[in-house]
Amino acid sequence: MKEKVIRRCSCGFVAYTKAEWLGHRLGVDAAEKAAGDSGIVAAKHTEVELTEFQVELLAFQKGVIRYVYVPTEELDGVAEHDLERVFYWGQNDFQPMRRRCSVSMGDVARYKGQRWLCAMLGWELIKEGGQS
């Protein structure tokens, strides 16, 4: 079964195979080695679905939006878990973005119509308009 891989680039949306995604993250030689060593060679022709999240980079970049792409298979629908995946994939070590810093404490992620603050330990739901 083939699933779509969605990744935003300067020209729009592009589909990648898992091997191409590894190649993007690790470099082609390292991706081929990782695929061989980990036994995921058969997965080279499997596509991976990515879910896009928007993060307001308030801590260091005055609220500019950073798009973070998380493999959908890593999401389970629980806000705190999914936001931790957003934090992980929002690091420039794993998903480098030119002129964007990594997701940091003080940034705000948009998740299922709500805004969540990246706190010192975990994530806190932001109550809009003084609601409690």
Image (cartoon, rainbow, N blue to C red):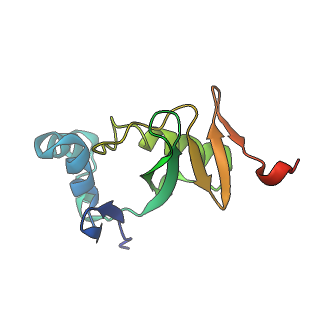
Question: In this rendering, is residue 70 above or below 105?
Answer: below
Mark yes or no: residue 14 visible. Answer: no
Q: Quadrant of residue 16?
A: bottom left
Q: Can the viewer see residue 101? A: yes
Residue at x-position 46% and y-position 59%: 52
Name the outermost residue toward the front. Answer: 62
Residue sitting nearer the eye, 61 or 24: 61
Q: Position of residue 103 (x, y in %)?
A: 47, 38
Seen from the viewer's position, the closer of residues 88 and 129 is 129
The residue lying at 58 percent from left, 34 percent from top is: 106
User: Residue 98: x percent and y percent?
Assistant: 27, 44
Q: Quadrant of the N terminus?
A: bottom left
At x 56%, y 31%, the residue is 105
Q: Residue at x 80, y 53 (%)?
A: 129
| Rendering coords of residue 58 (x, y %) | 53, 39
Q: Is 59 left, or right, of 36 in this rendering?
A: right
